[in-house]
Image (spheres, helix red, strand yellow):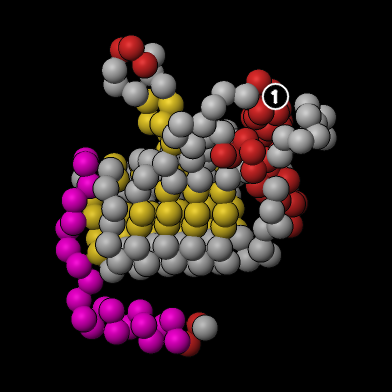
C-alpha cells in the first residue's frame, strides 16, 4: 500500500503536476515517486508469474486506480511506468510486450485491439540545451474499434479516430482520422476505408450495440 506523504496531495494533484507550467511542489513530487514505485511493484507482480484473467484485471485495477471492466483481455508481460492516468473502454485487447508511458494520459476506446510490443509514449523532451531535456506531456487518445499492429509506436499528443488501423511497425506522430489506414515511419495515410467497408462496420456497430 502507498504511504501518503501529505494527506492534501492526491493522484489528481500529481497528474496536474505533469501539465505545462505546473509549479514544482516537493510533496507532490514525493507522492509521484511513490506512485512510480507502486507501478514497478505491481508490474513485477503481473509479469513474473501466471495469473488468471480475473487476477490480471484486479492487478490492472490497482495499477490504474480504476475498476477495470470484466471484458478487458490482456496477455502479459505488460509495462506501465505510472498507471494512474490511463482509461480503458470495454472489450479492449492488449497483446504481450506493450509499453504504456501514461503520465500525459492515455484513453483507449471500446473494442480496440493493440498488438505485440506496441509503445504509447506521452512524454517528449525539450530540444533546447538550456532546458536540460525538460519533460513535456501530452495525451494519447485512441478511439473505438481501432487496430494497432505489432511494434507500432504512438507519440505524445496523438489522437486516433474510430475504426482506424495502424500498420505494424508504424511510428505515429500526427493525428489519424477515423476510418483510415496508416503506416510507415513517420506514419502516413495508405488509404481510407471504402464506402462498402464503412457500411459493413456501421452494420456491425448497430448489431453489437
Task: Determine the image quadrant of residue 189.
Answer: bottom left
Within 10 Å of disc 1 (Cα), the crowding (few <14, some 14-19, many 20+) is some
Looking at the rendered image, the quarter that the N terminus falls into is top right
Does residue 189 show up magenta in the picture? yes
The residue shown at (56%, 49%) is 86
| Residue 47, above or below 184 | above
Query: Could you say where residue 36 lies in the image, as x and y percent from the top left?
Result: 64, 29
Question: In the figure, 148 relative to 157: above or below?
Answer: below
Quarter assignment of residue 130:
top left
Tell me the magenta residue range.
185-206
Residue position marked by numbered label 1 in the rendering: 27
The number of discs equals 1
Front-most of residues 116 and 4: 4
**Quick one: 109 or 152, which is closer to the camera?**
109
Q: Residue at x 49, y 63 (%)?
A: 109
Q: Is residue 63 visible?
A: yes
Q: Residue 121 at what x, y percent from top left?
A: 43, 38
- Compared with 19, 202 (above or below) is below
Tell which of 47 and 19 is nearer to you: 19
Which residue is at a point 21% across and 41% down the rendered structure image? 186
Q: Is residue 79 left or right of residue 173?
A: right
Relative image position of residue 111 (x, y in whole percent):
49, 67
Amino acid at each position: 500500500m502507498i504511504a501518503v506523504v501529505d494527506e492534501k496531495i492526491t493522484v489528481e494533484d500529481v497528474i496536474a503536476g505533469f501539465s505545462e507550467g505546473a509549479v514544482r511542489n516537493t510533496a507532490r513530487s514525493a507522492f509521484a515517486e511513490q506512485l512510480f514505485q507502486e507501478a514497478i511493484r505491481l508490474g513485477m507482480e503481473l509479469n513474473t508469474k501466471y495469473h488468471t484473467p480475473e487476477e490480471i484485471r484486479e492487478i490492472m485495477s490497482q495499477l490504474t486506480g480504476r475498476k477495470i471492466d470484466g471484458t478487458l483481455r490482456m496477455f502479459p508481460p505488460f509495462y506501465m511506468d505510472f498507471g494512474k492516468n490511463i482509461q480503458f473502454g470495454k472489450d479492449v485487447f492488449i497483446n504481450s510486450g506493450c509499453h504504456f508511458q501514461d503520465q500525459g494520459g492515455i484513453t483507449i476506446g471500446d473494442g480496440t485491439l493493440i498488438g505485440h510490443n506496441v509503445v504509447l509514449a506521452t512524454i517528449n523532451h525539450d530540444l533546447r540545451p538550456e532546458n536540460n531535456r525538460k519533460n513535456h506531456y501530452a495525451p494519447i487518445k485512441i478511439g473505438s474499434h481501432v487496430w494497432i499492429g505489432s511494434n507500432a509506436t504512438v507519440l505524445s499528443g496523438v489522437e486516433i479516430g474510430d475504426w482506424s488501423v495502424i500498420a505494424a511497425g508504424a511510428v505515429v506522430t500526427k493525428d489519424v482520422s477515423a476510418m483510415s489506414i496508416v503506416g510507415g515511419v513517420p506514419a502516413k495515410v495508405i488509404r481510407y476505408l471504402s464506402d462498402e467497408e464503412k457500411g459493413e462496420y456501421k452494420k456491425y456497430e448497430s448489431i453489437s450495440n
